[in-house]
Amino acid sequence: MDKLMTILPGTIFLVVGFVLLLWAHKIQQYLLTRSVTGWRRFNPFLPWMRTKAYVWTMRSGGFLLIIIFVFVTFFVIRS
């Protein structure tokens, strides 16, 4: 039961990781359209959100989440 309680939240990391890794550009477009409507003046990151570095940051975060899931799963199964 303890292993299941550890791997189950880790699955959320896996899903979010794949979403960030595969659809980073679509997420960027969605967030940019949401940022333009009224709250633009409160978002200091808006110029950076328009760059390719933002997409690569999301992809790196997705890759990191997948790696975390793999390590946690490996150590839980091993113990």
Image (cartoon, rainbow, N blue to C red):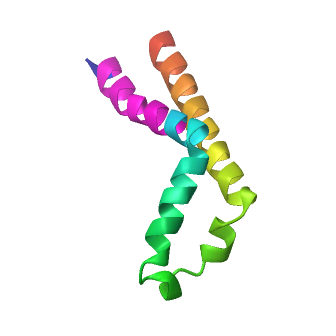
Q: Position of residue 32 (x, y in %)?
A: 53, 66
Q: Main secondary structure of the magenta part?
A: helix
Residue lying furthest left in this view? 1
Q: Where are the magenta residues, as a range?
A: 3-17
Question: In the picture, which quadrant includes the N terminus?
Answer: top left
Image coords of residue 58 (percent x, y): 61, 50
Task: Name the outermost residue toward the bottom.
Answer: 41
In the picture shown, does residue 6 fall above or below 43?
Answer: above
| Observer-nearest of 20 and 38 | 38
Does the magenta segment cover residue 23? no
> Quarter of the image holding residue 5?
top left
Left or right of residue 51, residue 42 in this image: left
Locate residue 51 relative to residue 7 in the image: left or right.
right
In depth, the one of 59 and 37 nearer the eye is 37
Residue 52 lies in what quarter of the image? bottom right
Question: Residue, x 31% and y 20% (percent of image)?
Answer: 4
Which picture quadrant has residue 70? Answer: top right
User: Residue at left 53%, top 33%?
Assistant: 18
Q: Position of residue 2 (x, y in %)?
A: 30, 21
**10 over 25 or under it: above or below:** above
